[in-house]
Amino acid sequence: MNPLWLSHFTATSSIGRGLDQTLAALRQRRTGLAPCAFDTVDLATFIGEVAGVDAVQLPAHLADFDCRNNRLALLGLTQDGFAEAVRAAIAIYGAQRVGVFLGTSTSGILQTELAYRRRTSVTGALPAGFIYRTTHSAFSVADFTRHYFGLTGPAVVVSSACSSSAKVFASARRMMAAGLIDAAVVGGVDSLCLTTLYGFNSLGLVSEQACRPFDTHRNGISIGEAAAFALLERTPEHLDADAVLLLGIGESCDAYHMSSPHPDGLGARMSMRDALKMAGLKSSDIDYINLHGTATQSNDAAEGKAVQYVFGSGTPCSSTKGATGHTLGAAGGMEAVICALALQHRLLPAGLNTRQLDPTLDLDYVLNNREQPVARVLSNSFGFGGTNCSLIFARAD
């Protein structure tokens, strides 16, 4: 595969709006997790909520798309000059040659939850102003994004649980390789809702504390929300040394269980090895792994075994979900941006909240930030049903 260039990227989550705030939070080892006070939720848990989402106003001509998920998307798109970069790409390639590939899990389901509270008492009908297609539907966030930019090319949403916004990189690459598009807006947006919080709680997967990935006493996830985007373009002849490239992608589906990973991390092994193969790299070429690291007993154990199998125990790794929470369908995109920052700023981010590393996993887990040269990194995203995706990014030099 010819490398693709992440010409621009941005992220907005509970640790900050945009790259500067996100990097500062990582450097300061600052978490965005706090006790849950979202809407009417009555659960003893921590969440990663983005402040100010409800105050965001969509342009008047896009009012039909108004929901928390699309407001969060707009908040993310307007950080770090990203919207301006997309418009510049449109001017070069044309509106029909820039694709949109976004991941989400629950999209705007909160809008439906709110609509149900306002049902007509006599008939139970939903409010007249509720528009499922432009708010709740999985395609809503991609449709909003393409309308926001006036794009007319391919637009796709991947909803494969927690691997969603990693797999969009693969979807975009295939369309670029086929010659259908010249550039792509990729990433993911997932926002808080009651369905997610109560749903994961019903599975016994929600921690009452801020999550502790790979800790001996880890006991569940902390749900977060985020909007993360990258603009993918073909690699030009000349690049700055710290430009970020996408070198390899690995996808697998072990289909072991609807909500539990293969206990030996079989699918995770396959995705990591396939990413290395596509990039033409050996496991020893990777300087850092951003782990999926959800902080459940089974997920961390399975991923730990898979990493040991492919890399041994000497490659530095960490999960950044102790900072952002598990942003579900946005996690792959969010952590791709964190990997890009790691490459550009020579920073291996610490895994927050982990105090007693699980000794059975035998990993070089980064408990405190490390500042060192970083040339190539791998990011893991694993979803329900065994839908796995691994991405390899590198500095241009």
Image (cartoon, rainbow, N blue to C red):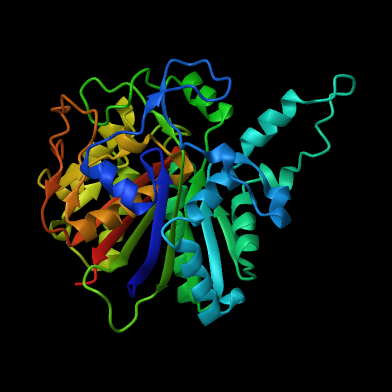
Name the quadrant of the C terminus. Answer: bottom left
Asked if residue 393 lies left or right of residue 135, the reply is left
Q: Residue furthest right?
A: 122
Q: Position of residue 32 (x, y in %)?
A: 35, 33
Asked if residue 304 lies left or right of residue 68, the reply is left
- Who is closer to the viewer here, 177 or 139? 139
Residue 300 drawn above or below residue 65: above
Q: Position of residue 196 (x, y in %)?
A: 53, 30
Figure disc tally: 0
Residue 5 drawn above or below residue 217: below
Name the quadrant of the N terminus. Answer: bottom left
Q: Which residue is at a point 73% across and 31% down the rendered structure image? A: 115
Q: Position of residue 225 (x, y in %)?
A: 46, 38
Could one spot residue 220 in this view of the protein?
yes
Q: Which residue is at a point 16% across and 58% down the rendered structure image? A: 374
Q: Which residue is at a point 43% across and 39% down the rendered structure image? A: 327
- Who is closer to the viewer here, 180 or 95? 95
Q: Position of residue 122 (x, y in %)?
A: 90, 20
Q: Residue furthest bottom?
A: 237
Asked if residue 366 lies left or right of residue 179, the reply is left
Residue 346 drawn above or below residue 190: below
Could one spot residue 270 in this view of the protein?
no
Choose top left, top right, bottom left or bottom right for residue 59.
bottom right
Q: Which residue is at a point 63% across and 55% down the rendered structure image? A: 144
